[in-house]
Amino acid sequence: MGNPRPKPERLAEKLLSIRQALGLSQTEMLRRLGLQEFMKHTRISEYELGIREPSLMTLLQYARAARVSTDVLIDDEMDLPARLRS
């Protein structure tokens, strides 16, 4: 059935780093992203473990929370800033 689309290999690592840099629990991160009404905190865990990929709109919310471009999240060749601003 065709080839699967390529996935960013470092995305899970970056999402975990963002949450930790912001000093948030998974539940708090869900609230920070404004997604508490749509999913449970276990979804954040699934993103951080690479089990699931967030939607584009969720990636946008992560990028806004960390004040980085979505490119930084998606591009495996780009690193998160050494210090994230909350």
Image (spheres, helix red, strand yellow):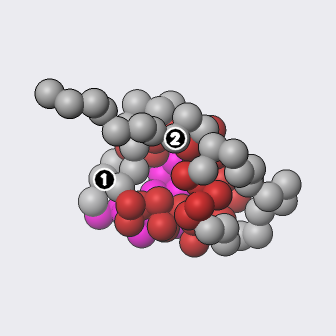
Kind of residue sitting beneath label 2:
Pro
Q: Which disc number belongs to residue 39?
A: 1
Q: What residue is drawn where x is 34% and y is 39%?
A: 5
- Estimate the x, y position of residue 3 in percent, counting from the top left: 28, 30
Query: Taking 14 as reference, is 62 left or right?
Result: left
Label 1 CA crowd tier, 10 Å (few <14, some 14–19, many 20+): few
Query: Taking 79 as reference, is 5 left or right?
Result: left
Front-most of residues 84 and 70: 70
Query: Taking 2 as reference, is 59 left or right?
Result: right
The residue where tag 2 is placed is: 8
Q: Quadrant of the N terminus?
A: top left
**Residue that extends furthest to the left in the rendered view of this protein:** 1
**Residue 30: quarter of image:** bottom left
Looking at the image, is mark 1 or mark 2 nearer the viewer?
2
Q: What residue is drawn where x is 66% and y is 67%?
A: 68
Q: Is residue 29 above or below residue 6?
A: below
**Residue 72: quarter of image:** bottom right
Q: Quadrant of the C terminus?
A: bottom right
Q: Which residues are magenta?
A: 24-37
Q: What residue is drawn where x is 63% and y is 43%?
A: 76
Q: Is residue 71 above or below residue 8?
A: below
- Estimate the x, y position of residue 19 in percent, counting from the top left: 63, 51
Residue 27 counted in the magenta span: yes
- Estimate the x, y position of residue 56 in percent, counting from the top left: 38, 61
The answer to whether one can see residue 46 in this image is: no
